Amino acid sequence: MAPDINSMLSLVGGGVGHSPLFSFLRLHHDSIVAKAAGDRMNWEKLCQWFAQAGLTNVHGEIPTKDCARKTWYRVRKTISAATKKLAAVDNSKRVALEAQRVEALENKKALESDREALKIAMLKADEGVQERRLAASRERSQSVLFPDMAAPQTAPHSDTHNTPNMSAPPSVTIGQVATHFTMKKQAPRYGDDRNTPLPAPYVGPRPEGMPANLPLEALMPLSATGRRPDGNIDFEQMPGLPRRSFYETDREWALDCMPMLEAIPHASRTNVIKAMISWMQMKLGNGYRSK
């Protein structure tokens, strides 16, 4: 049977060096101070009561008025020192908690600033890509309203005067409601990850198979090496694919990676891509089905 800690705690304190009178006064310090309310103590009558109660000094003698007064002084001094020590400990705890709160707030602001800067960089990159695409489409098209239409092929000059076959503008479905989705956001970063800088932004078009609700900031830049410092392959930071640090769980990350990996034609899949697909399938388990 394990020993009872409560029986041990009842013996803590009151060791050799303190008289029964000292122990009694210390035990009832708060009640005595409250009752006295600042008045002087009647040590003559109190010593008579101490004698009847068997409260002696350290030598086992009935305390005198001077002895009782000095004992009470030592009791108050001891309790005052203990109270100050506890207050100092509580204050240090409050200071430490406040420092942790300030650090957490600063880290949160820094993360929000990083997100905003990355978002602005990605928007600028997207704008540049879209502008170049639109300019190229307009150069190839005769229609400003439908710039994605290819310019019609004109028939060679002949003696016939038939009108070239012009393609009709794309049909529009009236009342068709656009699909709504919420873009995913960077998962919170904890511990040492908070101080790890985010990778450079991905610049380029959205890759094939990329989920519609996944922002470009989740992708590793095409300049990434895909390797760890020791030279081994790093599936968590592959160029052009979602980085693991954007997600909270491996499964969320794998579910976004798989459609992009599967969109790569079989003939173009390198051994690294094949190995990553197998690795992702193991993470997702038998329940995963390719789309």
Image: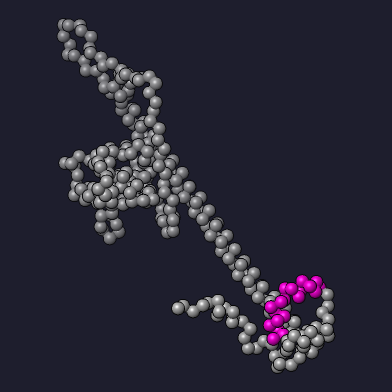
Foreground pick, 230 / 34: 34
Q: Is residue 26 magenta?
A: yes
Residue at horizontal 38%, vertical 19%? 174
**Camera sees residue 241:** no
Horizontal side of 149 relative to 109 (left or right) equals left
Q: Give how far across and how far down residue 121 sits, in percent.
A: 41, 41
**Residue 208, can we see it?**
yes
| Quarter where residue 202 is shown | top left
Above/below status of 216 relative to 100: above
On whether residue 76 falls in the magenta region, the answer is no
Which stretch is magenta? 20-38
User: x%, y% of residue 104?
Assistant: 51, 55
Quarter in which the C terminus is drawn: top left
Position above or below: 103 against 209: below
Q: Is residue 83 above or below residue 190?
A: below
Give percent across and percent down for residue 173.
35, 20
Chosen colour scheme: one colour
What residue sits 32% from the left and 23% below the top? Answer: 147
Majority secondary structure of the magenta segment? helix
Foreground pick, 243 / 229 = 243
